Amino acid sequence: MLTELRITGLGVIDDAVLELHSGLTVVTGETGAGKTMVVTALGLIAGGRGDAARVRIGSEKTTVEARFEVGEGSAAGAIAAAAGGQLDDDGSLIALRTVSSDGRTRAHLGGRSAPVASLTEAIDTLLAIHGQSEAITLLRPTQQRAVLDRYAGLHDLLGQYRQLRKEWLSARAELADRVARIQERAQREQVLRLGLEEIAKIAPLPAEDREIAAESRRLDNADALRSAADEARVSLVGGEDMSDAAQAVGMVESARKLLESSDDERLQQIAAGLRESSAILTDAAMELSAYLADLDADPERLQELLARQAALKALTRRYGSDVDDVLRWSTAAAQELADLDSSEEVLEGLRQLQQEKAVKVAKVGAELTAHRSAAAAKLGRLATSELENLAMGRATLRIGVSQQEVAVSHEESVTVGKRHLLAGPEGLDSVEILLTSHADAPELPLQRGASGGELSRVMLALEVVLAEAEPVGTLVFDEVDAGVGGRAATEIGRLLARLGRTHQVIVVTHLAQVAAFADRQLVVNATEDGAVRSSSVRAATGSDRETELARMLGGTDTATARAHAADLLSAARAQIARDARTAVGVESRVPANAGEAVSKSGVPAKRKLAKNPASPL
């Protein structure tokens, strides 16, 4: 239950605290006074979109803070704990939302900063808001189906259906894609096979192209290499026509011997170095001799290498920059070909998978249909009963549930029994609310058969039935009585009062007939201070309440209007008392002095968000 609401910097509201109680509370006031801001504030607490344009002129931000009495073990408490928050010592949960003038928004839950999504999830278990716009959206088939699903409690089953349908459509799309690409895959398979055959025929080895290039260069330059190597060898060790003194080794040796014959220590060190140099030169000469022995001109070998090199280049032109790239392409192509070879098996597997998914979608869809059909009959019957209480006693409301048959080849067709049905995003069903406004009227879809006032009453009747089926403790209605008056308005007030016996109900209304049934009435007044417009709120009791009802009835505070207001209150009290006595198992909550005392009882004292409940708005 919502026990306190503080609003700061929202529209015409500067700072206000509302103390709220069980039962039916109405919020009234002149047009433009700011009473709808109460619903706007609750919408923010419930996770609605933060609008910087709603921030009060001159304020840096809008702040809305709400206290809910939830207790241990509540779903809202668990969500707050998961977000790092906690309940107060008295078991209450504080939720806070801010919207800055630049559009930034923040949320707190249980004393800790939390994502707006967590705030929404928690408040959705505590509070439901119904506004004028909902009556309009009720004309949409999607909203009509959503109403039925809420009543039937199909959230989990519908989620299961959506997931199965997603998997089914995914398998179906993959199958269609593969079938459409059969020719493309066949062409690709031929390319891969020819390539692998060509590579296998030549059978290249890793790095073979580099090795062949090196060897062929060596054979092709054999004469030049032989001349260079032989000349270098002769320079080191001499030839048949050279003296030892002309050879490099001989000269080094001569120098070494001259130095070694000296007794100078420095020259001896140089001689030792020459000895090492002589050994190095001798080794180099021996290596050159070996190189010359191996360097035989082999024209046939050279031709073999050039032919092999040409074959490898043919591969590298098609499959890679070098032989190693060709081998990598071959490995990848073999794997791809193996995958393509099994494509028919994959196709068959996908056919079977999508068929299995279609069967599951059909099964769960049929379950949804069964639940919807059963719930539709009950919801229509109960809503019709509520319409009788809303001055539409001859009206009948029926919830139609139907399916659309399609061709078996339709991409979203599933088979249920012998029927091929369209499996839409929300199930196999179309849901339509049908209204017979009186006994002689034809049954028409709600969007064609209901006037504005009738539409408001149909929505209210449905919401009353839904409220009795849902666990949400606080229901907020924003001018759901729009477009009605007279006896219909009285019956709406009576219905809301009855709803207030089991729920906390907060209603923004402009009708005195509705307000008279409230346990508590809050009045919003607007004042002008220069160019600044502000509002204040007060709890109207006794004669003050009669004055407000008189204003709502005729706009003037006259003795006649006051008498009419008093009669209205008296009649409402009497009707509430009669309804309470006839309600099976429900103890009457209505005291002798209107509804105010009821709202003051049964609410334990707790830490307040602010001291003055009638602080300026």
Image: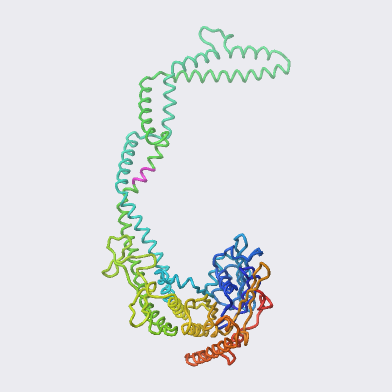
State the residue in front, 297 or 236.
297
In the rendered image, which quarter is residue 38 located in?
A: bottom right
Decide whether residue 62 is among the magenta residues: no
State the residue in front, 69 or 521.
521
Report whether 179 appears left or right of 19.
Answer: left
In the rendered image, the vertical position of residue 252 relative to residue 453, given as above or below: above
In the rendered image, the vertical position of residue 285 relative to residue 541, given as above or below: above
Report whether 528 appears left or right of 139.
Answer: right
State the residue in front, 351 or 292.
351
In the rendered image, which quarter is residue 277 located in?
A: top right
Coordinates of residue 259 in the picture (x, y in percent): 68, 14
Report whether 350 appears left or right of 58.
Answer: left
Which part of the image, by quadrant, shows the N terminus? bottom right
Predominant SS along the magenta part: helix
Coordinates of residue 593 in the picture (x, y in percent): 59, 91
Which part of the image, by quadrant, shows the C terminus? bottom right
Coordinates of residue 508 in the picture (x, y in percent): 55, 77
Q: Who's the residue at 32% across and 60% down the image?
A: 411
How many marks do you count on the picture?
A: 0
Q: Who's the residue at 36% across and 22% down the image?
A: 303
Coordinates of residue 93 in the picture (x, y in percent): 60, 74
Q: Who's the residue at 33% across and 48% down the image?
A: 340
Q: Which residue lies furthest to the left in this view?
A: 418
State the residue in front, 306 or 6.
6
**Which residues are the magenta region?**
332-337
